[in-house]
Amino acid sequence: MKKIILFVLCLLTGLMFINAGLNKFFNYMPVPKDMPAEMMKVFQAYMTIGWLMPLVGAAEVVGGLLLIIPVTRALGAVILVPILTGILLANISTSPSALPISLIMAAVVVWVIIDNREKYLPMIRK
């Protein structure tokens, strides 16, 4: 039962990351009208750096795909941790209304990391 719940949560989280990553390439989702001015300034700054959004979008798509596949889930979580850190920091500092969904996504990734901790141990052992 635990594996089924984890798979469903990873599927939903992975699809959210894939959607967000593809939006960085194709811009098919409209910008919310109630987005804080500080967040708009941050996004405009990101857009002036031409390579940053495609890099983040590619990492989101790859990380989301890897998170969905059980064999590669641990690698997907590692790829998504820095992205989730940025999402959480941005939501904490500029738009706390989006924080609940970010915390849920972070909890799923942390669960994946804890569930696959034996795969990470060789990296920190001598």
Image (spheres, helix red, strand yellow):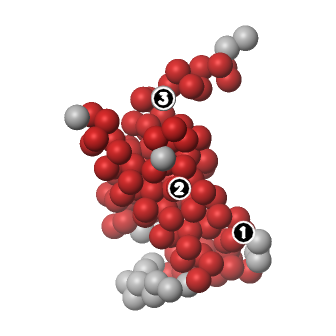
Amino acid type, mark 1 = Leu
- Residue denoted by label 3: 116
Label 1 near label 3: C-beta < 8 Å? no
84 vs 99, nearest the viewer: 84
First along the sequence among labels 2 and 3: 2
Bin the neighbour count of mark 1 within 10 Å (Cα to Cα): few under 14, some 14-19, many 20 and up. few
Q: Would residue 39 appear left or right of 5 to someone viewing this image?
A: right
On screen, residue 9 above or below 55: above
First along the sequence among labels 3 and 1: 1
Q: Nearer the viewer, mark 1 or mark 2?
A: 2
- Residue denoted by label 1: 52
Outermost top residue? 126
Amino acid type, mark 2 = Leu
At 56% from the left edge and 73% from the top edge, which residue is drawn? Answer: 22
Q: Point out the image quarter for the N terminus.
A: top left
At 28% from the left edge and 41% from the top edge, which residue is drawn? Answer: 4
27 vs 71, nearest the viewer: 71
Label 3 near label 2: C-beta < 8 Å? no
- Residue denoted by label 2: 65
Secondary structure under the numbered disc 3 in the rendered image: loop
The picture places residue 55, in percent across and down from the top left corner, at 70, 65
Label 2 near label 1: C-beta < 8 Å? no
On screen, residue 32 above or below 19: below
| Residue 39, visible in the rendered structure | yes
